[in-house]
Image: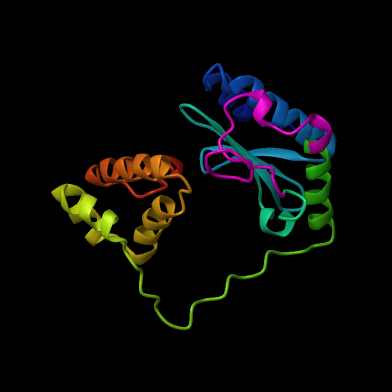
Amino acid sequence: MGTKHPGVDAYITQSADFAKPILHQIRKAVHAGCPEVEETLKWSFPHFTYKGILCSMASFKSHCAFGFWKGRLLEEKLQGAAKGKEPAMGDFGRITALSDLPSEKTLIHYVKEAVALNDKGIKLPRRAKPKKDRVLEIPDYFAGALKKNKKAWTTFESFSPSNREEYVKWVAEAKAQETRNRRLETAVAWMAEGKVRNWKYLRK
């Protein structure tokens, strides 16, 4: 039998009202898909383990996130899981309501697929290291917006290459002009405060 962690109960209780039914549903599906799963808190949010880390969930001010530790190996199974949603940590995009989650049956199926990977001892492939430093191309509109805000530009210049790339890609990958403008405005504001792109997910 699996185990439940009181810290996870507390985490859900302390989450925003919109998040509680979402977290309860995810937790229920994980236990249904893996009766032997054990709960723990890592990096300040709930993780589920079975022969290693299986998956995790988290709640934020206005959305929840859920993802599998070996999500890259489940890409074909999860194809379309985050379709139409704003990007977020995990495999399902920004989850703001129960309707953003797949059906319980589908969630349980995903969990069982993740369990099978751990049962077989399959590990995530190591990411290949680039043979040489890549030159990051910064779009003129991006640089122009930053230079209008001295604090944001100073922060961007002090960033590591990976931190710069995260912001540039996030803005540039927006398909709609309106979305790109909104992301650019947000990026400048965050950098003016000295924040990296994924500052929300950093452990406090």
Query: Is residue 65 toward the left or the right of residue 78 in the image?
Result: left
Q: Quadrant of residue 25?
A: top right
Q: Residue furthest top?
A: 17
Query: Is residue 79 toward the left or the right of residue 143 in the image?
Result: right
Q: Nearer the viewer, residue 131 or 80?
A: 80
* Residue 2 appears in the figure: no
The residue at the point 79 percent across, 30 percent down is 104
Q: Residue furthest bottom?
A: 131
The total number of labels drawn is 0
- Position in image of residue 203 (x %, y %): 44, 43
107 over 75 or under it: above or below = above
Q: Nearer the viewer, residue 121 or 111?
A: 111
Q: Nearer the viewer, residue 204 or 192?
A: 192
* Residue 16 appears in the figure: yes
Residue 96 part of the magenta-drawn span: yes
In which quadrant is the N terminus drawn?
A: top right
Residue 171 part of the magenta-drawn span: no
The residue at the point 40 percent across, 45 percent down is 177
- Position in image of residue 40 (x %, y %): 64, 39
Q: Quadrant of residue 125?
A: bottom right
32 over 137 or under it: above or below = above
- Position in image of residue 141 (x %, y %): 27, 55
Range of residues picked out in magenta: 79-106
Q: Main secondary structure of the magenta part?
A: loop
In which quadrant is the C terminus drawn?
A: top left
Q: Quadrant of residue 9?
A: top right
The residue at the point 24 percent across, 42 percent down is 193
The residue at the point 46 percent across, 27 percent down is 61
